[in-house]
Image (cartoon, grey):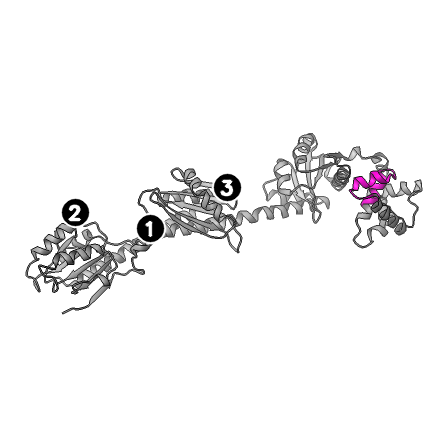
Amino acid sequence: MLHYGTLVRAGLSRKYNPAQGERHVAPTLRRLVARAPLRLRVLVGADRLDRPVRWVAVSELEDPTPFLEGGELVLTTGMRIRPDTAAAYVARLVEREVAGLGVGVGLTHEAMPDELVQAAERAGLPLIEVPRDTAFVAIGKTVSELLAAEQYEELSRAFAAQGRLTRAALRPEGMREVVRRLAAEIGGWAALLDDGGAVIASAGAAAGDHVRGVRPELERLRGRHASLTMSTPGEHIIVQALGGAGKLRGYFAVGTAGGDRVFSPVAHTVVNVAGSLLTLALEQRAEQPEAERRVRSAVLRLLLAGEGAGARAALSALGDSLPEPPVVALATRGGLDEVLDAAAGAFTAALPDDGECVVLAPADAVDALIQAVGRHGPVGVGEPVGFDRLTEGVDQARRALAAAHRAAAPVMRYTALPGQGLLALLDPAAAGAFATALLAPILEYGTRADLLDSLRAYLEANGHWDAAAQRLGIHRHTLRYRMRKVAELLDRDIDDPATRAELWVACSVL
């Protein structure tokens, strides 16, 4: 005689929790009663046999519900069921949301009690007759086997979906393909957004409308490495933050097509796989621009060193090429990314450790590029040169850029700088050595680089203190102090015309 409740766990790793809304794949009563060896007979509820059976509970208690969680097939010989208690017994089982009731006949009851049949019909509870020769444990084993088969099929579906997502990630537009594949796998919608909330890719029915619907939640998540799950009467949504090593790269939103659908365990697995693949893709995308910047800087260094063949080979790795000579160098202090976009079609690179960008453009495309690049700051423009004279052309552009900043001019061409015709007559190496030697005391004086800028401004203003100070943005007394320091360090009379001429030449070629 059984006076306790025993629960046959049907191979599940977690229990069903109705309050939390968890769902597991489970066999139905229809599949169970179809097993011929069990010889089960449905007396009531033939139209309700699609209910899932998540456990088999065997109990002879008058009230077994404290030991139930919902979704069980309750088996009993009816020891505690009497005509006057049948209705209450059935009502308790229905309230507990059991899958059905199986009663063994031939022991306590030779046949199914009429009161129990009538109570089950009124309550809509499937009632199954279990013949005396069918052991309850055989029913439990059958449910376990069905559950194991369902779980195996579930895992197989998850692995197959993972394979399809991985193959999608390997395609040319990997991120977009993963989003499209995921929407198809879950029969819903999916969207990938960057860390600012802009949509990178979306797929599925009315994906744009769904994304607009989750915008308020995305705003609350902005800048945070967090995730959330939302459930409304109309749909179920998962939003995941993507990124590794504490760096937020973007967000990933996915939802069901609406109605009462929820994410199955397979769908959760597929969503997590897609999130991992998209995180990897975003990390790679974030690293690519920095790698490209390093390659471009290396190409520029090779060009300036006269290694044209090596520069072209390195640049080809980016799918880019150098313009045909003669080329004109443009120098600017705008951000590299902005200049790259503005100077599409020309070669652009950052000067190492200088904060300046150099654009090498064909001579016939210079005017259009000056206008495009100039939107991001002043531009210095050199003369047309071949790659054998590229160092000279880049130096010209940088000198013109420095002059543009001093004059607060949007564009300065090297040919427009005062005295460039005279300086062109000088040997560059000799002139550079002369300038370095003459200005060495200033250049070596601590970190006072402002002394050289002040000297340039003073000479360009022809010794007018107010004009020079205004150009530098400092008080004229500050400028006077600096110029006294310059005269002291150089041991020269800066009011002497010959001295000024030498200093101007030195500042111009340095």
Query: Which residue occupies the extreme left position in the image?
Result: 110
User: Amino acid type of disc 1?
Assistant: Ser
Look at the numbered discs 3 and 1 and tell me whether their residues touch, using CB distance below 8 Å.
Answer: no
User: Quadrant of the image for the C terminus?
Assistant: top right
501 to 98, vertically: above or below: above
Q: Quadrant of the N terminus?
A: bottom left
The span from disc 3 to disc 1 (Cα, nearest Å) is 29 Å
Query: Is residue 492 shown left or right of residue 395?
Result: right
Q: Earlier in the sequence, mark 2 or mark 3?
A: 2
Which residue is nearer to you in this view: 210 or 34? 210
Give the crowd class for mark 2: few <14, some 14-19, many >=20 residues within 10 Å. few
Q: Quadrant of residue 15?
A: bottom left
- Can residue 485 be seen at all in this image of the molecule? yes
Q: Which mark is residue 47?
A: 2
Report the magenta residues as a range: 453-475
Please, what secondary structure does the residue beneath circle 2 have? helix
- Gap between marks 2 and 3, in whole Å? 50 Å
First in residue order: circle 1 vs circle 2: 2
Q: Which residue is mark 3?
A: 198
Check disc 1 and report the residue beneath it.
264
Image location (x, y in percent) of residue 271: 40, 49
Q: Seen in the image, is 322 located left or right of residue 181?
A: right
Q: Amino acid at mark 3?
A: Ala
